[in-house]
Image (cartoon, rainbow, N blue to C red):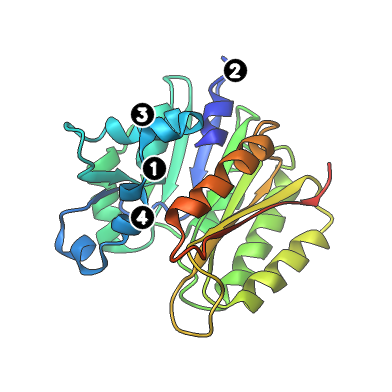
Amino acid sequence: MEALGHFVKKESAFEYVDSHAGAGLFNLASKDAKKLEEHNYGISKLVASDFPELLDFFTAIRAYNKSAKINFYPGSPAIAKHFLRKQDRAWLYELHPQDYKSLCKNVESSKKMRVFCQDGLKALESVLPPTSRRGLILIDPSYEIKSEYEHVFRACVNAYKKFSTGTYIVWYPVVERRQVDVMEKKFILSGIKNIQRFELGRSADTRERGMTSSGVFVINPPWTLFQKMSAVLPRLATILGDKNDGFFKCDILVAE
């Protein structure tokens, strides 16, 4: 959200690439959402007035809800659609057929927002560098297959070679900490400069099954990002933490 807000501050066009766009918009009243009711541990616990720094985030959510109650939660493509101007472009990739169908319905493929049923990691090389020379690339697979950690790292390095001035946001889940540690070390040793890492967790790492936290590696982050995350993440960890076990990480992994 902060990255999108940063890009639209300049009049010049930019391009947004989402490698794993998903369905785009989520109905919190659906059967699937009610199975786990994960929103009750996240967005439903937050009060917009408590986080003026996240005004753009809450404004985007309100754009998809007719009442004060949050019934629909926008995914990254829907949030991008909220920000994009007429001069900007988006490239959305989703390989899962049903999610692709939902994505087309929720964001509507157009000249401004192109939607493809393709492997987003493989597609990166074909859309980079963007014609505008300004680009935000979001890479956020499910990591259901352990080899995806390596695939994501390699895809990011290859994309960076083609477009070194772009902003890359690489999401990761913490299911097994070792996998994340290996990925982090690879990024540090990759030769890529200006990498920051942000993570938020409801509880400490565990050997039990399930995700305890998630985070992002950000390459070429907006200059305002580290300061804002340093202020917001501690408060989010306190509110969202399970039995006071919430935690956060806010690090500069590689300097500029």
Question: Which secondary structure lies at badge 2?
Answer: loop
What's the mark number on residue 77? 1
Query: Which sits earlier in the primary sequence, circle 3 or circle 4?
Result: 4
Question: Which secondary structure lies at badge 3?
Answer: helix
Residue bearing mark 2: 10
Q: Is mark 2 in CB contact (under 8 Å) with mark 1?
A: no
Residue bearing mark 4: 22
- Number of residues whose C-alpha sits closer than 10 Å to that of mark 3, classed few (under 14), some (14–19) or many (20 or more): few
**Amino acid of disc 1:** Pro
Q: Marks 4/2: CA distance?
A: 28 Å
Note whether 226 is above or below 179 in the view shown. above
Query: Which sits earlier in the primary sequence, circle 3 or circle 1?
Result: 3
Is residue 28 in view from this perspective?
yes
Is residue 24 in view from this perspective?
no
Residue bearing mark 3: 59
Q: Marks 3/4: CA distance?
A: 21 Å
Note whether 81 is above or below 189 in the view shown. above
Query: Which sits earlier in the primary sequence, circle 2 or circle 1?
Result: 2
Of circles 3 and 1, which is in front?
Answer: 3
Of the pair 25 and 68, the residue shown nearer to us? 68
- Left or right: residue 22 compared with residue 139: left
- Left or right: residue 128 compared with residue 44: right
Question: Which secondary structure lies at badge 1?
Answer: helix
Of the pair 183 and 129, the residue shown nearer to us? 183
